[in-house]
Image (cartoon, helix red, strand yellow):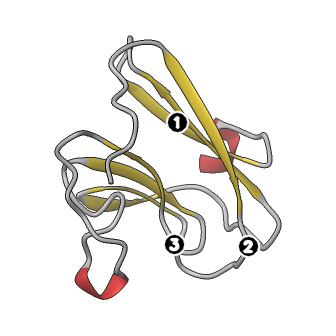
Amino acid sequence: TKGLLLTSGKWYYEAEIKTAGCLQIGWADSSFVGHCQADRGDGCGDGPSSWAFDGWRRYRWHSTATEWGCRWAEGDTVGCLVDMDSMSISFTLNGKGEEIGR
């Protein structure tokens, strides 16, 4: 199923990490057709139609990985923000923003 198509405004959601394992969480555009199967390499962030934060391996993803962020743990909260007006995406970990990427 497809989600909600966002075209303007600022949007935010949070997710609690239930396992400290390898996963990617983020946003996808309307052309995203990935599958949530790590062995296929076509989940959120793995292609040009999605963006993700991976706190296990400490990467930001958008087709390729860029080292960024700090490691998350079980019980942490990841925030996913998108500003459609400025076309920007950001992530938080336990309420902390850019400082987690240093």
Q: Residue at x 38, y 13 (%)?
A: 8
Q: In whole angstroms, how far apart are the C-alphas of marks 3 and 2?
A: 11 Å
Instruction: List the residue tagged with mark 2.
Output: 18
The residue singled out by tag 1 in the image is 90
Of all residues shown, which one is farthest toward the front? 1
Q: Which image quadrant: the N terminus? A: bottom left
Position of residue 44 relative to residue 12, above or below, is below
Crowding near the residue tagged with mark 2, few <14, some 14–19, many ≥20 C-alpha atoms within 10 Å: few
Looking at the image, residue 47 sits to the left or right of residue 2; the answer is left
- Reading the image, the residue beneath label 3 is 23
Amino acid type, mark 1: Ser
Label 3 SS: loop
Query: Of residues 26 and 98, which is closer to you in this image?
Result: 26
| Residue at 43% from the left image edge and 54% from the top image edge | 52
Q: Foreground residue, 55 or 19? A: 19
What label sits on residue 100 in the rendered view? none
Q: Nearer the viewer, mark 3 or mark 2?
A: 2
The amino acid type, in three-letter code, at marker 3 is Leu
Q: Position of residue 29 (x, y in %)?
A: 27, 40
Residue 58 relative to residue 15: left or right: left
